[in-house]
Image (cartoon, grey):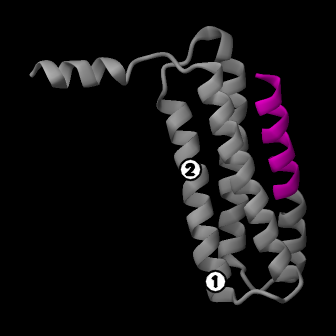
Amino acid sequence: LGVIGLLALAGCEPLTSNELGHEAGVIHSTAAEGALLADGVVQSDTLSSYVRAHATELASAADTSARKLHDGTVPPGLRQATEHAIGIATRTSSALGDLELSPNNPELAAKLESKLKRLAAEATALENSL
């Protein structure tokens, strides 16, 4: 019973700027990899089945980042940056979901590639600001 109590308390520790920076880096990597995947669709170099499966995995990773940040105990000084990171992760997941649903559409993929590159840059800027 004591171990369960300690584990519960450990989960309540406030989010640190280092942890938020790490998660922003994860979001950056996810968005950047999604941009590469979208470029594969634009260049007609990637099978639609691969695009669909990999976009699903990447969207899940972005959702996981958003959930971690949303569920964490956020100190007041990091609240705005955390909300920004959650927004970037959510928009990344949404773009990847669009790619998953249209893995054969090069015009849409070009727009999504650009959007995912912007999101990756936004995540990097956030990471560097912490």
* Residue 86 visible from this viewpoint: no
Q: Which mark is residue 61?
A: none
Label 1 secondary element: helix
Residue 118 sits inside the magenta stretch = yes
Name the N-terminal-most of marks 1 and 2. 1
Give the quadrant of residue 127: top right
Q: Which quadrant is the N terminus positioned in?
A: top left
- Residue under circle 2? 63
In the drawing, does residue 89 fall left or right of residue 6? right
Q: Nearer the viewer, mark 1 or mark 2?
A: 1
Q: Is residue 15 above or below residue 119?
A: above
Instruction: Give the class, few, some or many, for how many residues have Cα within 10 Å of label 1's Cα (few <14, many ≥20).
Output: few
In the rendered image, residue 49, in percent from the top left (x then y), is placed at 62, 87
Residue 20 sits inside the magenta stretch = no
Instruction: Give the class, few, some or many, for how many residues have Cα within 10 Å of label 2's Cα (few <14, many ≥20).
Output: many
Q: Amino acid at mark 2?
A: Asp
Which residues are drawn in magenta? Answer: 116-130
Give the Cα separation between the discs numbered 1 and 2.
20 Å
Q: Main secondary structure of the magenta part?
A: helix
Residue drawn at (82%, 24%), measured in percent from left and top? 129
In the rendered image, residue 77, in percent from the top left (x then y), is placed at 67, 10
- Residue under circle 1? 50
Q: Is residue 64 above or below residue 129?
A: below
Label 2 secondary element: helix
Q: Which quadrant is the C terminus positioned in?
A: top right
